[in-house]
């Protein structure tokens, strides 16, 4: 009788675990693999020596004579969205300032704005996330 109760309990435990795994897989979003395009803009819209700020995508595309790069416009202090200024970028929440490359000029932000991968394809710049 005890053996039957153990088997029943073991089957119930295995069924619960498998059910939990199935629910977890169902509720977890699937990764599409690789990087996803966050934004795509014409290369001509990005001024040489300047930046194209895309607040709707929380990123900025930077262009120098050497190439194109992108940065995330999320402040590294508490996650507010930074805004472009003539001197670079600033955080309206707590006053952090960043230069035109996203490096910290004054805090409380502990680190530079995060770089994002940018790929030039023909006359289009794709900013990637992931």
Image: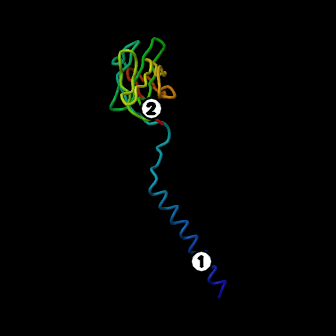
Q: Nearer the viewer, residue 15 or 86?
A: 86
Residue at the spot of label 2: 128
Q: Where is 129 relative to 119, above or below? A: below
Q: Where is 20 relative to 124, above or below? A: below
What x and y, as percent, mark residue 36?
A: 44, 36
What x and y, as percent, mark residue 116?
A: 47, 29
Label 1 secondary element: helix
Q: Residue at x 63, y 79 (%)?
A: 7
- Tell me, what colour scheme is on the image? rainbow
Asked if the residues shown at circle 2 and circle 1 are in contact, with their CB atoms under 8 angstroms apart, the answer is no
Residue at the spot of label 1: 9
Q: Residues within 10 Å of mark 1 (few under 14, many from 20)?
A: few
Q: Residue at x 67, y 83 (%)?
A: 3
Q: Identify the mark nearer the N-term, 2 or 1.
A: 1
- Judged left or right of residue 97, residue 7 is right
Q: Nearer the viewer, mark 2 or mark 1?
A: 1
- Judged left or right of residue 129, residue 54 is left
């Amino acid at each position: 009788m005890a053996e039957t109760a153990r088997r029943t309990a073991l089957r119930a435990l295995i069924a619960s675990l498998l059910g939990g795994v199935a629910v977890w897989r169902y509720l977890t979003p699937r990764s599409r693999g690789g990087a996803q395009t966050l934004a795509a803009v014409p290369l001509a819209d990005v001024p040489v020596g300047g930046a194209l700020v895309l607040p709707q995508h929380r990123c900025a595309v930077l262009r120098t004579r050497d190439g194109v790069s992108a940065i995330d416009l999320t402040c590294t202090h508490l996650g507010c969205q930074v805004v472009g200024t003539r001197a670079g970028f600033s955080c309206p929440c707590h006053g952090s300032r960043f230069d035109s490359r996203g490096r910290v000029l004054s805090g409380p932000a502990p680190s530079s704005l995060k770089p994002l991968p940018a790929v030039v394809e023909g006359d289009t710049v794709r900013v990637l996330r992931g």
